[in-house]
Amino acid sequence: MTFCAAPSDTSMEATQIAPMRRGACPSLSTPMMTGDGLLVRLRPEKSGFALAELTAIADAAALCGNGILEITARGNLQIRGLTAQTVPLLSQKIADAGIAIAEGLAIETPPLAGLDPAEIADAVVVADRLRAAVAAHQPPLALAPKLSVVVDGGGQLNLGAVTADIRLRAVQTNGQARWLMALAGTETTARQIAVLEDAAVVPAVMDILKNLAAIGRHARARDIVGAVATRWATTFNLDEIAPMVPAPSAAGIHDLGDERSVLGIGLPFAQIHAHSLGTLLEALDILGATEIRLAPGHALMVLGIAPDQIGAAQALALGHGLRAFPRDPRNHIAACAGIGACVSARIDTRAVAQMVVDTAPALLDGSLTVHVSGCAKGCAKPSASALTITAAPTGYGLVVNGPASEAPNAYIEENNMRTALEHLDKLVSERKQGGESARSCLTRLGADGITAAVQQG
Ligand code: SF4
């Protein structure tokens, strides 16, 4: 077994620990303390990682942390189980591998940006212009650590479900590509502000960022959305903008046209061990993979595999226990890190998630997401779910149509969970009317019907 060398005193002093609270954002320079040690979150500066780069990160995670890597719901990479002594070495390993990590304001683009033939406009170009404007601003803008901007060209794997402070979405109006700007939310919850010509995008976003910086490092777009909406009264009728089509599951093969395709591989319940990732990357390399991009939905997008090899790569990923098909029931469960990894967790979220897969397949038809949360914070899915299983004082709470923070509709003793899920599975299987989805069936049964089923002795 290899152990990390102790870093110099100077590098240890340079490691600041981010407090574990809302608004804190762990990075290499400010890792966050969790239940299994320090955690850092990384975003590559480029669109993705070369295979050798991700292999180097996996090796460094095994050497400096507990070997567990995660991809978050919005597609960031997390390394767990670090210590104040090993974080500087991790930084060094990443720098030695020549990997540039993005710092500062998160400006996010869809995982297939610049490659997707369905895009209305290239989000990468706009994101790069925006990054350059932010970097050139003097004095540097002091912004909230978790502030984010989404630039979405409107392709297949869009970022509609990802929450952002500022959203830019390419739209076609009068036969021309323009950018719909919205603030504070997902594609469906953000306040639409204006439709902008391409040249107006960067000045508009910079104006908002400067306003936020003037308020202070805690300011988020939700704090100024009303004032910005008034100021940006638009000549376009925002009601005429077509709604975004929800993105499909990242897991599976996605066609890029011109006989090109990309394989989406989801991590089961968001995690993978560094050794598994290393062997997967080695095998994907042999099959011709050239680049890995991180994607929302805890997924990796594998680029460069020839069409006649992509089926083999998909089978390989499945053989590693990963989600490689759109119909994998695990695509429809959101689970946070849980007990052993988070100090706030009171249940083993991953074990419960697997129990849902094993005992309640009728729920996982793709029409809803079952959310398993270690506490009321609901990190894995802050928005409401048709079913949320959360920690309760003596077992589990079941929230119907709500977030983890809501009071549970039913309480289930720890030892009764499997039986409760079997009853729920039976209820949905028996009551589904011809062609009905699990979501629609649960909506029809209502909270009372669901509660009665799970509390059945
Ligand atoms: S939701 Fe999960 S990861 Fe988030 S604080 Fe609670 S237990 Fe920890």
Image: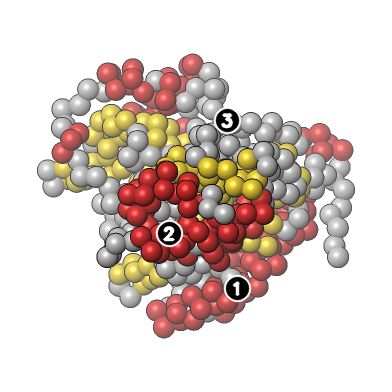
Q: Secondary structure at mark 3?
A: loop
Left or right, 322 with respect to 13, comes to left
Which residue lies at the image location 47% right of the left edge and 61% below the top edge? Answer: 425
Amino acid tagged 3: Gly
Q: Nearer the viewer, mark 2 or mark 3?
A: 2
Locate residue 170: give its quadrant: top left
Residue 320 circle label: 1
Between the C-alphas of marks 3 and 1, the distance is 35 Å
Viewer-proximal residue among 446 and 202: 446
Amino acid tagged 1: His
User: Could you say where residue 383 lies in the image, as x and y percent from the top left?
Assistant: 45, 40
Which residue lies at the image location 47% right of the left edge and 36% below the top edge? Answer: 148
Which residue lies at the image location 60% right of the left edge and 54% below the top edge? Answer: 417
Q: Which residue is mark 3?
A: 23
Placement of the N terminus among the 4 image quadrants: bottom right
Which residue lies at the image location 27% right of the left edge and 47% below the top edge? Answer: 244
Q: Secondary structure at mark 1?
A: loop
Amino acid tagged 2: Leu
Left or right, 152 with respect to 454, comes to left
User: Could you say where residue 440 lies in the image, as x and y percent from the top left?
Assistant: 32, 53
Viewer-proximal residue among 418 and 448: 448
Between the C-alphas of marks 2 and 1, the distance is 33 Å
Question: Can residue 128 be seen in this snapshot?
Answer: no
N-terminal label among 3 and 1: 3
Q: Is residue 211 above or below residue 346?
A: above
Q: Is residue 385 above or below residue 69?
A: above
Q: Residue furthest front?
A: 457
Structural crowding at the residue carrying mark 1, measured as other residues with C-alpha within 10 Å and reported as few (<14), some (14–19) or many (≥20): some
Q: Secondary structure at mark 2?
A: helix
Q: Which residue is mark 2?
A: 427
